[in-house]
Image (tube, grey):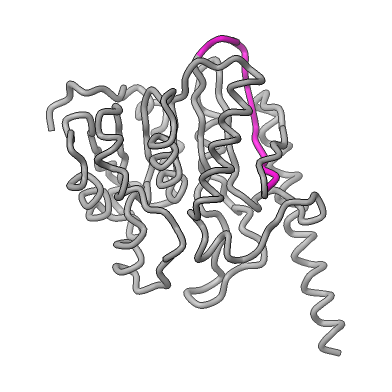
Amino acid sequence: MKFLLLISLLFLSACSMSSRVDNTYSDSTDAEFVVHQIQAEPFLLTSYERISSRNGVANVYIEGDGNAWLSKKKPSLDPTPKNPMALKLAELDPAKNVTYLARPCQYTRMSNGSVCGKKYWTSHRFAPEVIEAMDHALDDVKQRHQITGFNLIGFSGGGNIAALLVAKRGDVLSLRTVAGNLDHQLQSQIHNVSSMPYSLNAKDVAHQISDVPQIHLIGGDDTIITEDIYESYRRAALKPECMKSYIVGGVTHINGWEALWTSLLAKIPNCDVAL
């Protein structure tokens, strides 16, 4: 009986994931995005791409942590986001070249050869091999479309990954984060949840990337990623004059960003802003 129950749960989980993959594909094709899978060892990463100008700059959106936990103590079986905020924001971006990068194990069926396990959406969420895979994905996009530079936009945990990628690369022109988890150690302490000792932290590279123009957006009603987390990151930077933060009123961690995204995109990262 227990075996049959386990099989049933796995089947339902697979069906749920398949539905989310198919629905996201349908929604994105309406916005003229093309789905592409990138082999980035040890993962198979999913991207959605809308490229209309080769030899140009691309805006790259990096997804949040997705459906990582069912509760504080119970991880999910599938981190594919139920509400893919980074993808929704990418669809609203009018730039000529826009790419969305899902995180490892999101929108990727296990049968496709991707090495996925719960650790990659829990303790190893930002592990070195995860950052290497995302870095490889940018190389892949750059090569296939002759991209000359990137503007990185990361939502939630995707903001942490975006900052870590800036530290690895020399072709990132700007960094934007939306409710970005820029100090996951502090975030874990604030919410009294499991720390991620095997994960890299954006705060630790803040000084290294402080000369890259940055804008960090914080939801005024966000109880998950608070202003304290950004301030911890900012204090670690050597040149905070290249960083600008905005408290966006009436916005929670997941609600309200879409309605304001066009106006928020009009804020251009630069190193001349007054703090």
x, y (%) of residue 57? 49, 16
167 relative to 107 in the view: left or right? left
Picture layout, residue 159 above or below residue 74: above
Picture layout, residue 107 above or below residue 101: below
Closest to the observer: 148 or 23?
148
Question: Who's the residue at 37% across and 47% down the image?
Answer: 180
Question: Who's the residue at 86% across and 90% down the image?
Answer: 1
Furthest toward the bottom, the residue is: 1
Closest to the observer: 55 or 259?
55
x, y (%) of residue 71? 51, 73
x, y (%) of residue 147? 55, 17
Question: Who's the residue at 21% across and 47% down the image?
Answer: 236
Q: Quadrant of the C terminus?
A: top left
192 relative to 247 in the view: left or right? right
Can residue 74 be seen by looking at this rendering?
yes
Question: Who's the residue at 69% across and 48% down the image?
Answer: 107
Can residue 252 be seen by looking at this rendering?
no
Closest to the observer: 13 or 140?
140
248 relative to 194 in the view: left or right? left
Residue 149: in magenta span = no
Picture layout, residue 38 above or below residue 51: below
**Which region shows up in magenta?**
43-56
Closest to the observer: 193 or 246?
193
Q: Which image quadrant for residue 163?
A: top left
Prevailing secondary structure class for the magenta stretch in the rendered image: strand
